[in-house]
């Protein structure tokens, strides 16, 4: 088991860049912010950073309400060098959803399965419901104070990634939720959790509903326009509520390619493995047994042929076998 004290020692005397996966979600941002505050306690300065966009209303609200300063790569690249230390949070090198920045990725804190073996000076990869759980555990282990804003942010990230403790939840997630509950500001949480749907979200729901196709207990839905990563996942969860569906594959057609979200309530179907196999050779994907994501980049779309939607369904149904008949 990794000892977070080792990470502190490695980072002392340096300015650290804390990098999330591209298009960071609440768990990624909360985890990065929590680590930033932990570093701050030990006199280590850090910058939160990402590539892509923060394009969901709920995530934008989170950064504003909790006053989290996270910068895009374009805002920091001119100040970075190859010697700068980077800590990857809620992400791993080679996973396909994180851009290779100029600096040296010396550490990884994540809760996703390992798809590419990478050497780090420090690594803490645990299969728990959220990355925020791991960061919270550091505070508990080191017995250092946590302010109510940090606790609220971590609690929000934990709740979002585990779907309010109903998905992929472990005993450690529950223990850390209790730890945060005593410290969080419930008024702040209520503020960030309310009124998070935009009018454009309704269009995405409508498009997905109109395009649903069922193969066995697998539900496919295409959103024929650009849609934020987080919303694709939410719509995938929404379709999973159908009583005849236990696996969902939802994808959005965007300028940079096709973005996928897959969910599984079937213990025999590992979402991360399914999407990794289905997109092999044309894209990349991975994640947890119950939830995963993937991407086919624009330059690879021609590999799908003249009928891309049919090709996508064929790839997934082939991997899913009897479950998609």
Image (spheres, grey):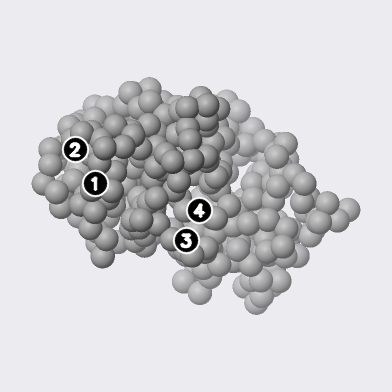
For the residues bearing labels 1 and 3, Cβ distance under 8 angstroms: no
Vertical arrangement, residue 74 with respect to residue 172, above or below: above
Q: Which residue is mark 1?
A: 8
Disc with the residue nearer the chain's start (2 vs 3): 2
For the residues bearing labels 1 and 2, Cβ distance under 8 angstroms: yes
Disc with the residue nearer the chain's start (1 vs 2): 1
Mark 3 surroundings within 10 Å by alpha-carbon count, few (fewer than 14), some (14 through 19), many (20 or more): few
Mark 1 surroundings within 10 Å by alpha-carbon count, few (fewer than 14), some (14 through 19), many (20 or more): some
Instruction: For residue 166, say whether it is visible.
Output: no
Spatial CA span between label 1 and label 2? 8 Å
State which quadrant residue 53 falls in: top right
For the residues bearing labels 4 and 3, Cβ distance under 8 angstroms: yes
Foreground tag (1 vs 4):
1
Q: Which residue is mark 2?
A: 42
Spatial CA span between label 1 and label 3? 20 Å
User: Would residue 236 appear left or right of 161 to someone viewing this image?
Assistant: right
For the residues bearing labels 2 and 4, Cβ distance under 8 angstroms: no
Mark 4 surroundings within 10 Å by alpha-carbon count, few (fewer than 14), some (14 through 19), many (20 or more): many
Q: Determine the residue positioned at 71% across, 71% down.
A: 318
**Camera-side residue of 293 and 75:** 75
Quarter in which the N terminus is drawn: bottom left
**Camera-side residue of 166 and 44:** 44
Q: Which residue is mark 4?
A: 93
User: Would residue 62 appear left or right of 313 to someone viewing this image?
Assistant: left
**Camera-side residue of 98 and 198:** 98
Position of residue 316 measured from the top left corner of the image (x, y, whole percent): 68, 65
SS category of the residue bearing label 3? loop
């Amino acid at each position: 088991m990794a000892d977070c004290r080792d990470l502190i020692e490695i980072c002392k005397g340096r300015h650290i860049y804390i990098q999330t996966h591209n298009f960071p979600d609440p768990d990624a941002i909360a985890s990065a912010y929590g680590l930033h505050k932990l570093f701050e306690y030990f006199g280590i300065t850090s910058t939160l950073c990402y590539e892509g966009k923060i394009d969901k209303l709920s995530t934008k609200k989170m950064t504003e309400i909790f006053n989290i300063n996270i910068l895009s790569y374009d805002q920091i690249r001119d100040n970075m060098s190859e010697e700068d230390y980077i800590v990857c949070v809620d992400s791993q090198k080679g996973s396909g959803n994180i851009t290779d920045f100029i600096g040296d990725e010396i550490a990884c804190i994540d809760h996703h399965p390992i798809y590419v073996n990478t050497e780090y000076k420090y690594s803490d990869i645990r299969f728990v419901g959220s990355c925020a759980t791991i960061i919270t555990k550091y505070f508990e282990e080191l017995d250092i104070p946590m302010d109510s804003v940090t606790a609220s942010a971590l609690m929000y990230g934990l709740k979002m990634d585990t779907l309010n403790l109903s998905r992929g939840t472990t005993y450690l997630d529950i223990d850390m939720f209790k730890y945060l509950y005593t410290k969080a500001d419930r008024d702040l949480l209520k503020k960030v959790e309310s009124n998070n749907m935009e009018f454009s979200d309704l269009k995405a729901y409508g498009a997905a509903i109109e395009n649903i196709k069922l193969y066995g207990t697998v539900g496919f839905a295409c959103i024929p326009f650009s849609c934020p990563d987080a919303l694709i996942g939410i719509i995938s969860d929404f379709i999973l509520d159908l009583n005849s569906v236990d696996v969902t594959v939802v994808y959005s057609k965007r300028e940079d390619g096709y973005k996928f979200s897959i969910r599984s309530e079937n213990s025999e179907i590992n979402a991360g493995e399914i999407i990794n196999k289905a997109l092999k050779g044309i894209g990349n994907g991975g994640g947890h047994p119950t939830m995963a994501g993937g991407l086919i980049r624009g330059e690879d779309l021609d590999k799908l042929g003249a009928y891309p939607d049919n090709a996508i369904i064929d790839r997934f149904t082939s991997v899913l076998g009897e479950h998609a008949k």
